[in-house]
Image: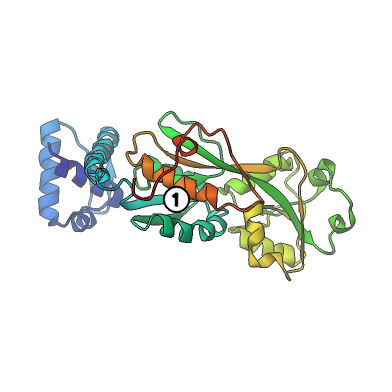
Amino acid sequence: MNLRDLNYIIAVAEARHFGKAAERCFVSQPTLSGQIKKLEEELGVTIFERTKRSVEITPIGETILAHARLIQEQSEAIKQSALTHQDPLLGPLRIGAIPTLSPYLMPLILLPLKNQYPQMKLVLSEEMTDTLLKRLHNHEIDAALLATAVEEPELEVIPLFDEPFWLAYPYDHPFYIKDEITREDLDNTELLLLAEGHCLAKQAMDFCHVRDRKDQGEMADLRASSLETLLQLVSAGFGSTLVPSLAMRGAWATGSGIATRKLEFKDAYRRVSLVFRKSYPGTQALDAFAQVVLENLPNTVQPLTGNKHSTKKRKISKTE
């Protein structure tokens, strides 16, 4: 068994196809298939079930795959350690972010990040929370910007900031003439929600007690796949919705026929954090990334202090 064989296993598991895995590993398909067959014989187990139509990983294969990914990461850590001796911030940093955060946060930090750490290459992906967590566990990304609590022993969390919720509604909505919007008002209003799987949808449902209501009314089946679509529906007069404060900087906020109001409740916010594997070797790069985020936040959000992570304990120099 060697590192090359483990890389072959990972490639096949991800591609679910020997030919595509071989292309990814820059070898011929017979070479890759033969090496995996030899490894299976050496271990005395079947890692992949092969048919003419599909390639499926066996239960013992899943266990082996988990170890293979950890070994692959540690192998990369050795290489990274050598590079770190020269520059700890050199190379790619693969960051995932949820769709209701990425379009509004990234424009604030991309240029400052490039200016402060030109040697760092940010590789950004935008997906929903469950997908990002899966990719994080599969070592496909290095860290994820999430707005839901994560309590998994193998993951580390850097809390970054609290993002208040605003309420968006049409000018002809009853909320427009109210001096104060109460919790009761929210509990009794029909709220436009994102489709299932978006963390913002769950947060809105929890905050406005949507789960306690009957699944009926004009908005019961009206869900959107993006925050921008929700806001278009609000603009067209279909209802109201919750908007994270960073999204208030969008072009829709002016001239769209939408009125907005910050919700003055203690729990009317979501916490945005940077989540990564404890085994990830590039924590100095994550420190630098988190620091840039904190330094470029608008005053509409609340940066978190008293962070236990080293981001709050030291400054990362450009040449460190």
Q: Is residue 228 left or right of residue 81?
A: right
**114 on left or right of 225:** left
Residue 192 placed where, x, y %?
A: 70, 54
Q: Amino acid at mark 1?
A: Gly
Question: Residue beneath label 1, please?
Answer: 96
Packing grade of label 1 (10 A; few <14, some 14-19, many >=20) is: many
Residue occupying the far top of the picture: 153
What residue sits 73% from the left and 66% below the top?
235
Q: Is residue 304 left or right of residue 20?
A: right
Residue toward you, 268 or 29? 268
Indicate the quadrant where residue 6 lies: top left
Residues 111 and 256: in front is 111
Residue 131 at least partly seen? no
Q: Residue 158: x, y in percent?
A: 49, 38
| For residue 53, above or below residue 43 | below
Which of 22/136 is in front? Answer: 136
The colouring scheme, among rainbow, by chain, secondary structure or one colour, is rainbow
Tell me residue 166's x, y (percent). 72, 52
**In the rendered image, the vertical position of residue 279 relative to residue 286, given as above or below:** above
Q: Nearer the viewer, residue 90 or 317?
A: 317
Specify the quadrant that holds the C terminus: top left
At 73% from the left and 71% from the top, the residue drawn is 255
Q: Residue at x 58, y 46 (%)?
A: 199
Label 1 sits on a secondary structure element that is strand
Q: Quadrant of residue 254?
A: bottom right
Q: Is residue 152 visible?
A: yes
Query: Is the N terminus in the top left, top right, bottom left or bottom right quadrant?
Result: top left
The mark tally for this picture is 1
Q: Residue 108 placed where, x, y %?
A: 54, 58
